[in-house]
Amino acid sequence: MKMKIAYLAVAWSIGSVVAMDVSAATEPAAETAGARARRAAQAQQHWAYVPVSKPAIPQVENAQWVRTPIDALILAQLEAKGIKPSADADRATLIRRVTLDTWGLIPTPEEVDAFVNDQSPNAYEKLVDRLLESPRYGERWGRRWLDLTRHADSDGYNADGTRPNAWRYRDYVIQAFNSDKPYNVFIKEQLAGDELWPERKDALVATGFLRNFPDEINARDLNLKKQEIANDLTDTVSEVFLGTTANCAQCHNHKFDKFSQKEYYQLQAFFSNASFRDDVLPLSGKALEDYQQRQAKWEEATRDVRAQIDTILKPYIEKAEADRLLGFVPETRVSITKPEAERSAYDKWIHHRNLWTMSGRTRNAANNLRRDDKATYAKYEKLTAELKTFDGLKPVDPGFLSTAFELGKESPPTHVLFKGIYDKPEEEVQPGFPSMLTNEQPVIVPTANSSGRRTALANWIANSDNPLTARVFVNRVWNQYFGRGLVNTVGDFGKMGQKPVNPALLDYLADTFVKGDWSVKNLQREILLSSVYRQASDHRGDTLAVDPKNTLLYAFPRQRMDAEQIRDSILYASGLLEEKIGGPSVFPPIPANFDNRNTWKVSDRLADQHRRSAYVFIRRNTPYALLDTFDLANPNLVHGTREVTTTAPQALALANSELVLEWSKALAGRVIREAGDSDLARIERLYKIALGRAPDTVEKASLLAFLDRQEKVLVAQREAGKPIQTPVGAKDTPAVVATVEGLYKTLYGRTPDKFERLALVSHLDSQQDKFAKAEPGDDSEGAIPFKSDLKGQSRSSRERNAAFVDAVHAVVNSNEFSYRF
Amino acid sequence: MSNKNSRRNFLVNASYGLGGLAVTGMLPGGGLISAVSAADFVDPLAPKKPHHAAKATSVIWLHMSGAPSTLDLFDYKPELVRLHGQPLPDSFAKNLKTATDGGVGALYATKRTWKQHGESGAWFSDLVPNLSKYADDIAFLKGSKTEGSTHVIASLKLHTSGLVPGRPALGSWIQYGLGAGNPDLPAFVVLQNGTSSGGGGRNQVIWSSGFLPAVYQGTGFRQGDSPILHLDRPAAVSDAGQRQTLDLLADLNRHHASNYPADTELEARLRSYDLAYRMQKSAPEAVDLSKETDATKALYGLDDESTAVYGTNLLRARRLVERGVRFVHVISGSPDDSLPDWDAHREIERNHGVMAKLVDKPIAGLLADLKSRGLLESTLIVWTSEFGRTPYGQTGDGRDHNPWGFTSWIAGGGVKAGITHGATDEIGLRAAEGIVDTYDLQATILHLLGLDHRQLTFEYQGRQERATTVFGDVVKEVVG
């Protein structure tokens, strides 16, 4: 009971710091050297802080089950409990599992057949290699890294404005996974790319990791804002890379981990000079030179007209800036208004933050001008029109990239804060590493215009001696494959976290990972090739008493697909997925009755609406509803594990969304196109595409009976003059493609893409449906231009086809489709 | 696998089930469970026992978005009237962290007419003539205070106890603590009106489940017949057709599940479709006002254009709590484009004239209606905002944000009726006595619902998190 109270007493957390009336006496934050040494000694005993050591690979009885040392380490634990591992999953199940796990997509029927029929002894090894080589791999694994980084395409808070450069960081991450960037390099680029490789644009983009914090762009207290950003960076970096809940020590010494409040601020000091900008040209080399030349020409040609515009706007801009200044709290104003020569490193940060977030001031100034002075505004408009005439000289707008950077070598001071309150500073501290992890002191070497602090931190985190870095990462990978980490608290390796269920395996993986030059793909390959991963997920009645939760992994844990896997796999099965890699985020359709429509302008191009979910725009306050329903990561947090909830709104979304139904219609169309008229052939093809297997006799009977029943309902529906659905693309045969393309060329002078073609065919289908209404039950006797091309393609009744759409929809909604086993 | 048979079996099975709106396997922050066996099965919305006897079972939270001036509604300050036009005295201004466009203006007296009402003698201005009739049902918290000078920060603190996004809203904590009162409806519903997205946060960020599982997040009910997204069948799907498709789905799922006899998550997903099918009827029914009498509608001001939209939301709120919804979060928005919301930096008379009219009659109607149905005893009404407004003026005829002292009130479920707790200083700038911070308000609400804010915890990132962080004391003086 006492323990419980003590536990609750530290159940604090305030997420931020505010000025509060605190009259209590100041707590001593300084620690004696003796106390520090004592704490360091105690910390040595915690498993996660001792160096990684290569474990001995145990001898096991069932040696033929062992394919990799991973298997021996798992099997030793199973044998100790008298549990047998499960046999390998059948090949169809295995390829569906491993394709979903590495790509986030289901395999095609052809891929399934090829693997099932591959007689070579290394069939599975070849499959794994093929999967890891595909760019689809980075789209899946990159997205899961983004979960950890608070990545979003918007600021958050109330205004939640767009961050137009955020997609570049997303692309950087996807590319890093695809190119198998060594994890230690990946860490350094994200924490200090601007200091280490200032000439490399991709290294600047990598610091988007730091830039991703949610931000209140209208913050009135920039001193508080600076502290909030520093807290975010400290907490995020500790949790993501070190699995350490440092934020517990923001207000007091960590009660469970040997992490003092002073050490928290020492860690924070690495970030005290980190600033950000969103206006760096994303070009380099020749492209940059060309751009600058063209830009210079344009500037030269427009010098005069721009000067005139500036003169007109100047008083209004100055007024807007003065007004904005008054909106800040007095302390903030002091830093902003100091003459440049007198600005401290701290003032510089505040001053820059004001400039950095002051967007749209020209637009506001022009609006105010229009309001106050019509005559001058007319002149202004004339000038801007004149300026526009020079647009032909302008280089193509390359956009910008966002990056962390620093405003000089000198860092603002960092203080221990009384109870974490930002304007209650105590002792000043210097950058330092947590003593529970190392006795090492940071070696900080400033660069030309940066403190070098983040480089020192990155070097320490990415060092092969760091006891946490590799352990935390391999555990995240394991967690994603098995739905549970070896340490199940993936973001907390401290004393309050769970102990590793298999410490030797964790160390084996960490050791192999580091010694394998931090290759993420090699780590994953070894896991995927293990017998543990290949096990069947079938029910095991014999183990419920010994290990009901399957903690020791005697069977493969089946998992519900995550949000992206569900959306992308349905799109893929229906042939609608647009596989373009990278670029600005896209806005797929939202339901007609969606409320916040102004925050979500649906992408114009149909192809963009069908991109993979990794490219869907992330607006913090308006997550894409269809994905959000299925437990999408919360972009305001370091999101280490996707929850799995099972809810009625999910069922509503999959069953009732017009969008998902469109996908089912396209899948039905594909099946009809590929399987022809026979109900049975269609059912078999559907199962092969959606589930990678043939239906059994019970399922066939069930579906055939359904088609009969449903057809009757639909006949009645049509006779009552109500619409029914039509499969989309069922007639997308070469002949129809030719007809439609001809039509398109005549109308628009170009070839349609697949989405435009399907839209047109679908439209013609509905026209046909209208024409045919006079003769219900009759099939394709409509008066549409390419009627003759359809002969022999589909003799099923329209109602039978509509019933088949419903059957497809049921399969798409089924448990088997939504899980990987 | 006869369809009829399996359907009947299904219903039999379902009736033994937990009946929750949702069923889950895993929890965040590293996850607890891989639901391989029945022992792990957790229905996150199954009703749970409170820590102590509850006085209220539901909450209707009336959020006045944009910050009304309670100095013009409830907090009568003769001294402010006396000092009107004078600069803010130094004794009050000391240590005041202002962030005011145009600086601190002169003190600005209320222009309203004031009267005491009821046995309690509580002061009301003439902006709220209907509400004043319920003086003896209300407990005023006149020493309310908070932190943060922008709407969104203070609003985050009010609803989630955090100043940066990421913490769960109080409604999410309550769902987590008590489960759902009606499995066919979301337990935490958000109702809002207006088109502007002005101060106070009409955004999901204040009804997010934060680090709690997503199943606990608030569900925004839309206006009109179909309150939830994806509630309506697709246009070309009939009820009969959908029923047959769902029966086929259940058949396929059950056939498949026979290979996984211990897998309750698969079973739960199967059941979720039947629940979804029921929700297609239960959710529209819950917001369908056609069976309400004209007298009831008039009570909420549905017969008057200026109050109809907000009144509709409050009448819906009553219907929702009647049906067991735990937490209804009603956010007052602007009735038209002439105002942002309560955020009266200028023209406070016009602004508050419109906004007070918008809410006064409907709120009075809600109290009357709940009372007459015996629901006020079990329904806690909370009237509050992200902060109040300053006693000094701004831009000549407005008031600035005031996080230092303002009035909130609570009524109904377990609240001591007809009292005033706490006070601001003589001019209404700062809370001076009986200070109630947002943490205390939250702790008090939890207490009335039978939950101890120190015991209601969720492990996240190695910490036992609470709704109110490390702060919060129950305001015992207002608990009946």
Image: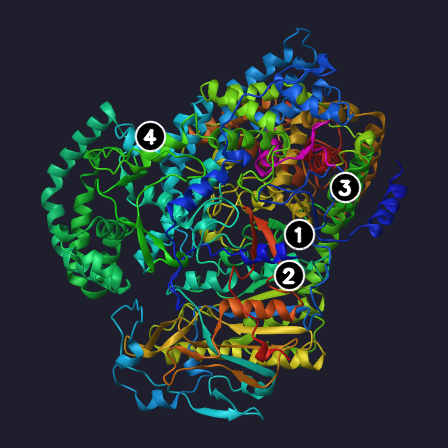
- Which portion, as a residue range, is magenta? A549-572
Q: Does dot 1 land on a helix, a strand or a loop? A: loop
Classify residue B4 by image quadrant.
top right
B281 vs A211, left or right, is right
- Same chain under badges 3 and 2? The reply is yes
Which residue in the protein does label 3 denote?
A: B264
The residue carrying pointer 1 sits among few (fewer than 14), some (14 to 19) or many (20 or more) residues within 10 Å by Cα, namely many
Q: How far apart are marks 1 and 4 (CA)?
A: 48 Å
Task: Give the residue type at disc 4.
Answer: Ala
Q: Quadrant of the C terminus of chain B?
A: bottom right
Chain name for mark 3: B
* Residue A88 percent coordinates (x, y): 72, 19
Q: Which mark is residue A203?
A: 4
Which residue in the protein does label 2 denote?
A: B225
- Same chain under badges 4 and 2? The reply is no
Q: Please tell me which of labels 3 and 1 falls first in the chain.
A: 1
In this rendered view, identify the residue nearer to me: A559 or B29.
B29
Give me the residue at 66% from left, 79% from top: B369
Q: In this view, does B163 lie above or below B109?
A: above
